[in-house]
């Protein structure tokens, strides 16, 4: 199954474009009837007995942009530097999910204060840990702000996410890394994530290329090829 997700003004829209599946419009609960043995060799799904098939339920919750810069950073400073403050009211909404996803619309790196009105975003390194504590498992770096602090900013962001055990998709030290699927396994079901940014609204210099740090630009040919690769590695692909 391939699950396509699009963020529109903070709302998440799901559609199943291949295979069988049902997606709840309010909780993003995916119920996928699959064969007794998953396509990936050696992965056996729980026997729950459903007309000789198996049902695996995975709770996937996705939020919109995550940005701890400008006025958000000012609020953090007002609360004695508590980076968890902006997430405090969200945590209870994310507790009952298997996978939580968001769009990390900022570079995560030490640096200067970003003033209100500036169009570059920078968040302190402690933000990665705060996101992990709030339950985030996967974040997309495929946007028009993750490269605001250049190659150094992207490299630092990747390092801080790695330290926090959060998967970053759609960005990397080169085009191969930026387009590589990241996989999470839940109850024997392997779910691959891919991320891309619309190049019409992103500086061309932000695109990841061979030997060049950046983000994955959305091209149908690239996405198609990447989904084929990811589908060989996972049971479900989220784009």
Image (cartoon, rainbow, N blue to C red):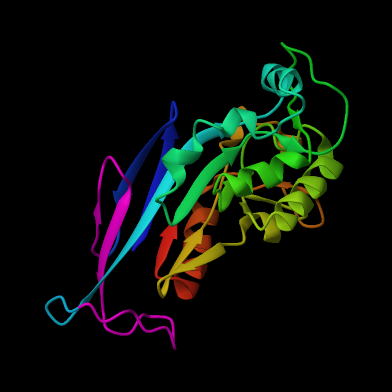
The location of residue 37, given as percent across then percent down, is 32, 85
Q: Is residue 132 left or right of residue 184?
A: right
Q: Would you say residue 76 is visible in this rendering?
A: yes
Q: Residue at x 73, y 27 (%)?
A: 121
Q: Give the magenta-colored segment's residue range.
A: 20-48
Q: Is residue 152 left or right of residue 207?
A: right
Q: Is residue 177 above or below residue 157?
A: below
Task: Look at the image and say whether residue 126 sits in the magenta stretch.
Answer: no
Q: Would you say residue 140 is visible in this rendering?
A: no
Q: Nearer the viewer, residue 78 or 232?
A: 78
Residue at the extreme left: 51
The location of residue 161, given as percent across then percent down, is 71, 51
Q: Is residue 196 left or right of residue 149?
A: left
Residue at the extreme bottom: 42
Q: Residue at x 56, y 44 (%)?
A: 134
Which image quarter is the N terminus in?
bottom left
The location of residue 95, given as percent across then percent down, is 44, 47
Q: Image quarter for residue 181?
A: bottom right
Prevalent SS, magenta region = loop
Q: Residue at x 42, y 39 (%)?
A: 93
């Amino acid at each position: 199954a391939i699950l396509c997700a699009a963020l529109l003004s903070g709302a998440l829209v799901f559609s199943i474009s291949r295979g069988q599946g049902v997606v709840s419009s309010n909780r993003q609960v995916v119920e996928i009837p699959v064969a007794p043995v998953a396509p990936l060799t050696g992965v056996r799904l729980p026997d729950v007995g459903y007309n000789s098939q198996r049902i695996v339920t995975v709770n996937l919750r996705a939020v919109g942009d995550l940005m701890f810069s400008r006025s958000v950073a000012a609020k953090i400073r007002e609360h004695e530097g508590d980076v968890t403050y902006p997430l405090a009211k969200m945590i209870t909404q994310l507790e009952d999910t298997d996978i939580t996803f968001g769009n990390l619309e900022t570079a995560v790196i030490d640096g200067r204060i970003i003033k209100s009105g500036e169009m570059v975003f920078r968040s302190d390194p402690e933000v990665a840990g705060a996101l992990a504590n709030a339950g985030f498992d996967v974040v997309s770096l495929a946007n028009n702000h993750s490269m605001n602090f250049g190659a150094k900013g992207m490299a630092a962001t990747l390092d801080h996410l790695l330290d926090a055990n959060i998967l970053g998709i759609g960005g990397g030290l080169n085009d191969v890394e930026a387009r590589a699927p990241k996989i999470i396994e839940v109850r024997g079901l392997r779910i691959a994530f891919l991320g891309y940014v619309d190049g019409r609204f992103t500086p061309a210099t932000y695109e990841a290329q061979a030997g060049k740090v950046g983000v994955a630009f959305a091209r149908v040919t690239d996405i198609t090829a990447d989904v084929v690769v990811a589908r060989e590695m996972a049971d479900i692909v989220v784009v």
